[in-house]
Image: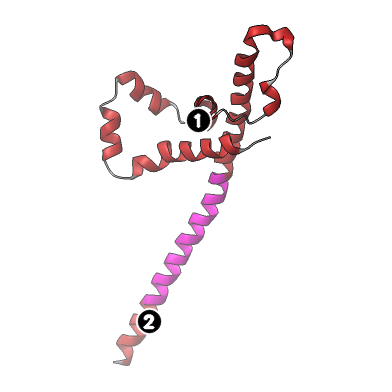
Amino acid sequence: MNPTLALVGVAIYILIWEKLPEWGTWFRAGLSRLPVPLQTLYEQWRCAYCVGFWIALALHATTGIWTLPALSNLPDFWGPVAPLIGWFLDALATATLIYLGKFIVDAVSWPAMRGYQMKQEWLKNRNRERDANAATAD
């Protein structure tokens, strides 16, 4: 198994659906200039598995990398549709890994974010105490 496509797929998903919308108004302005069907598609594709399937297909088409290389050589009885079935099944497997990767990122990021917030609160309180002690010492 090659996790390359899944890792790149998770990165693309996070970039497009989570980070770019936070980086100023330029991304939303660009989305508003797209045709309405594409805007609707962007808004409705929040599921990492669903969009992960299409990301996986696009990545496979551009890189030629297989998540499950065994799917590149399906039995002869599939005939000329074997490559299409292989791509479809590989994209499903990759989408599952993208979904799992997104789940893991979310699971790890919440405690990390909470720890960061707690540290910032502690630093604020420590600085307040220092300021209060400095004010009483004067």
Number of numbered discs present? 2
Q: Residue at x 65, y 36 (%)?
A: 2
Look at label 1 and name its amino acid.
Cys
Q: Secondary structure at mark 1?
A: loop
Q: Nearer the viewer, residue 97 or 7?
A: 7
Tell me where residue 37 appears, x and y as whole percent: 34, 18
User: Which residue has dot 1 on it?
Assistant: 47
CA separation in Å, label 1 and label 2: 47 Å
Tell me where residue 131 appears, x and y as whole percent: 33, 81
Q: Which quadrant of the structure image shows residue 82?
A: top right
Tell me where residue 46 appears, x and y as whole percent: 46, 31
Q: Residue at x 59, y 25 (%)?
A: 91
What are the residue bounds of the magenta stretch? 105-127
Q: Nearer the viewer, residue 63 or 98?
A: 63
Q: Secondary structure at mark 2?
A: helix
Q: Residue at x 30, y 20 (%)?
A: 36
- Mark 1, Cα crowd under 10 Å, few <14 / some 14-19 / many 20+, is few
Look at label 2 and name its amino acid.
Arg
State which quarter of the image contains the N terminus.
top right
- Whichever of callouts 1 and 2 sits on the residue coming sooner in the sequence is 1
Q: Nearer the viewer, residue 6 or 20?
A: 6
Q: List the single residue furthest toward the bottom.
A: 138
State which quarter of the image contains the C terminus.
bottom left
Mark 1 or mark 2, which is nearer to you? 1
Q: Nearer the viewer, residue 107 or 14?
A: 14
> In this rendering, would 23 be left or right of 16?
left
User: Which residue has dot 2 on it?
Assistant: 130
